[in-house]
Structure formats: C-alpha cells, structure tokens
Image (cartoon, helix red, strand yellow):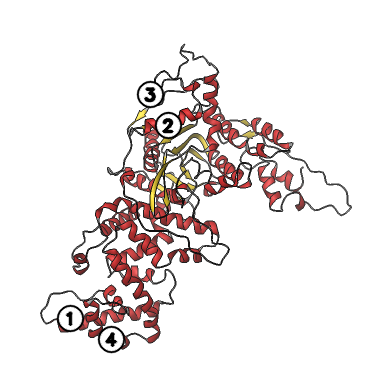
C-alpha cells in the first residue's frame, strides 16, 4: 500500500487521479513535509496509486472537464510533471458510455439566463430526458447570482431549494437587515421590523430599552386619544415618536408628541441616550425617502447607517464580507425596476396610514411574495414525484452529484473572478478558479449545460451600468476546438462544409475562416439589433462543423427589461477599517467599482 499524503491523495476524490489537491496541500504545509520519517531512519517508500475508472459522469462530460483542468499546470514553466499529469487525466476511463454532449450557450443577460435554465429543466422533464426522480443542480460562483434564478423558479412554478448555509436570497441576514429599515419607513407600526433595525448595527439598544420605547409609544397613543375630543386623526406612529426625540427635528407632528408625554416620564435616561442618535439618523432618512427612488434610497440607508461596517463585524472572513456586500448590491439591483416610479413615499402617504400605494410599498410586497413562496428545504426533497432544482455555489456542490447540471455565469470576471484575473496567467488564484470550474462540471452525471451572459451589470462609482461580457477563458478550450477543425477543411457527411451564418451576420463569411476577434465583432454587431444568440459546442470528433445557431426571442419576466432601468446616482464607497479582514469591493463584474474598458 502507498503511505503518506501523496499515496493517500493520488487516488483522487472525483473518481480519478488528480494530484492537484496534493500540490495544494503542499502549498499550505501538508504535503511531503507531513510524512514523518521512520524511527530507524530508513527511507520511506511513497507510491502514487491512481483510480483511473470514472463511474459518475459520461465520456463527453469527463473529456470536457479534462480539457479544462489539463491546462492548469501548463503555465508552470520548468515543471516536468506537467505533461505527466495531462497524460494521466487524458487516460482516465469513463465507464458510463458516451452520453449527451455538453453544451456551451450564450444568453443575452442574467434574466434571460435564469429563464432559459428554468425553461430548459421543464422541457427536459416534459420530453422524457429527466424523470421525476432525477436530480438537477444549478451551480453558480457567488451567492448573489441566486436571486434571479429563485425568481424565475417562482414565476414558472419550478420547485427549488437553495443548498448551503446562506439560504434563500431574501432570507439572508444582510438582506433582512436592509429590508427592516425599509419596512420601518413604509410601515412604522411593524414592531418586528423595529426589533431588527435597532440591532443593525448594534447601538446598545437591548430588549429592555426597546420595550421602554414601545411603552412610551403606547402612552403617547393613549394621551392622544384622551385629547382628541372627537377628532378622527390617527395617533402618532412609532416613527413619529422616535423622530420627536431628535434634537434637530422641526416637524409639527413630532413636536406635538413631546407635548403629549415627555420621554422621561416613561423611559430611563440611559435608554433615551441610546435612541437619540438613532432618531437623528432616521430623521435624515425620512426626508430622503420623500425625494429619492427606491434603489437610491436603499443605498442611502446602507451609507447613512453604516451597514457596511455592520456586515464587516458579523463576517468571519474577508470573503464572507464581500459575499454579504454582493448580496446587498444585488438587492439594490432588484430595486432598479422601481427607479422610474418616483420617490419611495410621498408626504401625503406618510400622513395617511390608509394609503398603501407607493414604489417602496410595491417593492416590499414583491419581496414578501417571493419570500413567502420560497420552499423550505424539508418541503423540496427529491423523491416527491416532481423534479426539484438544487441551487448552490460551486463550493457547496463539492462531493455531490446530479443527473443534470447547469453551470451559469461563465464569463470572465465571474468565473474566473476579476481578482484572480488581475493576478495574471499562471497564478495560484487563477488556477484555483480553474479547478472550481472542473469541480462544478464533474458534478454532472449525464447532462451538462454551461451558460454565459453577453451583458453584465456592474456598479460604477455612483450608479449601475452595463457592459459587454467575454466568455470565460476556461471555456475557450472547448469552443475553439471545433472552430479549428472547421478551418482545416473538415468534410460534412452531408457534403456541405460551410457553416451557416444566420441572418444579420456578414454574408459570404465562413465561420471557420473567421478569427476570434472577427467572431466577437460580428456577434456584438448582431446583438446590437436586439436579438439573442446561442452558441453551441459539440465535443464529438466525428462532427467537424459548427451546428447552426438557432435564433430565439429574448426572454423577459413580467415584461421588464432591466437594461431600460435608470441607474442610481447614490455613491458607494468602501469604508476604511483597521481590521485586516476588510477588503475591497467584490471583484465580480456585477459589482466592479470601476468603469469598463
């Protein structure tokens, strides 16, 4: 038997030999140095044993994954083991037959991508490609990418469950913290929202102080009822009561509150001192709510209340902080659909408790609807007679396997991340991203679909903007394989060796003779006309030509096109903290804090 770390890891975790994990452990100090010498100082014989039979995935999936991961060590100059590793991976023997070919598809944007995935899953079930007992996974790089996928599942009636510790999008801690302040502004009598808002971030307001504040609100309402004398005006709500405690507030309603019941008659001095700074912050936000649209107001809440510092405090690592901040940015992006609806609330609405029609109210209603329809993990288990889509990040998918896998967001800046791209080719970070792509692909047993978005959004200083995306460099080794064969004059069994370029592309140009730059330019020119294209890849060596790319209509949800939304004008600057776990803005292109090149 083999001994030591190399012998234990040589067998591979994914059904075949993969020495990359051993090399990773060597970098962190658990490689060959972890092998203790024998007491008699004799040499320790170490052997690598490779399990070369793969029983999980079909041949096409294994070969596609091998082509991506086999280039990992090529950038390591002077490493004689690189060619040996490539040979080992190429010699792995899949045991499940050829199977369907993996597909590489391009979608117009993130919304079209989410709709395509959900619609394809349902079509595969209806067509018999997937049985009710089949397992399906939708895998993405960052947690923020799950929002549109969840909304697409809810709208089209596909059962789903979000795997991992983060949970569904609108039930994540940082999302609930932001929404609690929106709920306080929209419905000040929602005491559950108050209970969460006073703790994000921590202000020294505990349960006892909060109960004192609620008793003060009840006392003000009772005194108002005594002095109303037949008037039908509503008593001051908790927000108006709190604003009356702000030193610089000049509102006549809040002035009336203090004349009804002074705070010191009900609340302790300590509790009052805790609530006064909070009252000053909400006083400013209340005025902004009457002038700013929903997305801009949401960013004002995060800035004015220092919620970024709060997210930093509750995060254990820099990666967790960036993930939380990315989720908040995705929430602001979800609010973009209400950009043109005017201010969050109006003065008339804030004075009339019966009025519920407002952009902020509509946004909160939509969020509540999606959150209520989100299934619990116990209610969405496989084996219930219906296919359940498992939504998860690549890290959460490790060690799992599914009949069908959809790997979404395969563009440079997402997978791999912008941070790893900045490190350059051959860097450890970029190699780890490549391995993550390999892990995600090898979760698939039979069906594998990889999608990327031609247009992605990012945060440019003070607003959301859109830019053209580039397909992930990891997929180039798959897609360009067939283009190269076409340029070599491969012969189609049907007798035609010309690729069909659909209407809108330059006529007379054979796809195989076009350079990569020409292909990209032609695709961008065609998409500028408002159409949507799909790229397809066939791994079989017997097919030398690219299949015709079908033209489909853009997919929209509720008739909303996010490209038509007006970007927010609120600034978003990273706070400067002294701790070393605080990093920069998330490096995904959806949240890049710089203008596109």
Regarding mark 3 in the picture, which secondary structure is present there? loop
Give the quadrant of residue 133.
top left
The residue furthest bottom is 265
Dot 1 alpha-carbon crowd within 10 angstroms: few under 14, some 14 to 19, many 20 or more: some
Residue 328 vs 441, above or below: the answer is below
Dot 4 alpha-carbon crowd within 10 angstroms: few under 14, some 14 to 19, many 20 or more: some
Between disc 3 and disc 2, whose residue precedes? 2
Between disc 2 and disc 4, whose residue precedes? 2
How far across and how far down the image is residue 478, in percent?
Answer: 54, 31
Regarding mark 2 in the picture, which secondary structure is present there? loop
Q: Give 404 or 533, whichever is nearer the viewer.
A: 533
How far across and how far down the image is residue 579, in percent?
Answer: 56, 66
- Residue at 62% across, 36% down: 71
Regarding mark 4 in the picture, which secondary structure is present there? loop
Query: Could you tell me how far apart the alpha carbons at marks 1 and 3 are, in whole angstroms?
Result: 73 Å
How far across and how far down the image is residue 375, in percent?
Answer: 38, 52
Between disc 1 and disc 3, whose residue precedes? 1
Q: Nearer the viewer, mark 3 or mark 2?
A: 3
Return the residue at label 4: 262
Task: Tell whether 223 sits left or right of 303.
Answer: left
Return the residue at label 3: 502
Return the residue at label 2: 129
- Residue at 38% across, 68% down: 196
Q: Give 238 or 505, whichever is nearer the viewer.
A: 505
Residue 90 vs 420, above or below: the answer is above
Q: Nearer the viewer, mark 3 or mark 4?
A: 3
Query: Could you tell me how far apart the alpha carbons at marks 2 and 4 are, in whole angstroms?
Result: 70 Å
The residue furthest left is 230
Query: Could you tell me how far apart the alpha carbons at marks 1 and 4 are, in whole angstroms?
Result: 16 Å
Return the residue at label 1: 225
Number of the label disc, if any, that sits on residue 431: none
Query: Could you tell me how far apart the alpha carbons at marks 1 and 2 are, in whole angstroms?
Result: 67 Å
């Amino acid at each position: 038997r083999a001994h030591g770390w190399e012998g234990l890891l040589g067998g591979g975790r994914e059904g075949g030999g993969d020495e990359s994990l051993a090399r990773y452990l060597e970098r962190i100090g658990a490689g060959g140095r972890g092998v203790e010498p024998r007491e008699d100082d004799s040499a320790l014989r170490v052997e690598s044993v490779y399990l070369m039979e793969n029983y999980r995935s079909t041949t096409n999936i294994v070969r596609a994954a091998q082509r991506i991961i086999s280039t990992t060590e090529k950038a390591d100059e002077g490493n004689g083991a690189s060619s040996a590793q490539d040979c080992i991976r190429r010699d792995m023997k899949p045991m499940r037959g050829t199977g369907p070919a993996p597909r590489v598809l391009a979608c117009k944007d993130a919304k079209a991508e989410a709709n395509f995935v959900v619609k394809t899953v349902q079509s595969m079930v209806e067509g018999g490609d997937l049985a009710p007992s089949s397992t399906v996974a939708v895998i993405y790089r960052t947690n923020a990418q799950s929002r549109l996928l969840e909304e697409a599942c809810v709208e089209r009636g596909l059962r789903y469950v979000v795997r991992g510790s983060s949970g569904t999008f609108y039930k994540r801690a940082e999302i609930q913290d932001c929404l609690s302040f929106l709920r306080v502004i929209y419905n000040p009598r929602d005491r559950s929202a108050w209970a969460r808002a006073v703790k994000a971030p921590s202000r020294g307001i505990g349960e006892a102080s909060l109960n004192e504040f609620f008793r003060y609100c009840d006392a003000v309402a009772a005194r108002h009822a005594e002095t109303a004398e037949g008037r039908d005006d509503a008593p001051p709500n908790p927000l108006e009561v709190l604003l009356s405690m702000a030193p610089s507030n000049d509102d006549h309603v809040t002035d009336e509150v203090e004349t009804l019941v002074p705070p010191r008659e009900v609340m302790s001095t300590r509790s009052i001192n805790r609530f006064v700074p909070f009252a000053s912050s909400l006083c400013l936000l209340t005025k902004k709510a009457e002038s700013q649209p929903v997305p801009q107001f949401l960013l004002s809440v995060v800035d004015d209340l220092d919620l970024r510092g709060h997210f930093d405090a509750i995060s254990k690592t820099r990666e967790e902080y960036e993930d939380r901040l990315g989720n908040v940015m995705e929430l602001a992006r979800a609010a973009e659909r209400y950009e043109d609806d005017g201010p969050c609330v109006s003065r008339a609405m804030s004075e009339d408790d019966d009025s519920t029609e407002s952009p902020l109210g509509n946004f909160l209603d939509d969020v509540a609807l999606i959150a209520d329809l989100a299934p619990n993990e116990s209610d969405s288990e496989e084996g219930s007679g219906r296919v359940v889509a498992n939504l998860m990040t690549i890290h959460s998918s490790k060690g799992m396997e599914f009949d069908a896998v959809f790997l979404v967001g395969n563009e440079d800046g997402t997978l791999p991340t912008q941070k790893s791209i900045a490190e350059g080719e051959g860097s450890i970070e970029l190699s780890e991203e490549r391995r993550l792509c390999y892990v995600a692909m090898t979760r698939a047993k039979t069906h594998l679909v990889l999608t990327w978005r031609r247009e992605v959004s990012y945060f440019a200083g003070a607003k959301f903007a859109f830019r053209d995306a580039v397909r992930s460099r990891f997929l180039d080794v798959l897609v360009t394989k067939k283009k190269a064969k076409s340029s070599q004059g491969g012969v189609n069994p049907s007798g035609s060796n010309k690729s069909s370029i659909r209407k809108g592309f330059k006529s007379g140009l054979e796809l195989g003779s076009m350079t990569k730059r020409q292909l990209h330019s032609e695709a961008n020119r065609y998409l500028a006309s408002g159409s949507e294209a799909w790229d397809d890849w066939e791994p079989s060596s017997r097919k030398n030509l690219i299949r015709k790319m079908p033209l489909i209509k853009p997919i929209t949800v509720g008739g909303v096109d996010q490209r038509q939304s007006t970007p927010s004008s609120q600034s978003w600057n990273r706070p400067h903290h002294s701790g070393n776990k605080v990093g920069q803005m998330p490096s995904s292109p959806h949240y890049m804090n710089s203008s596109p090149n």
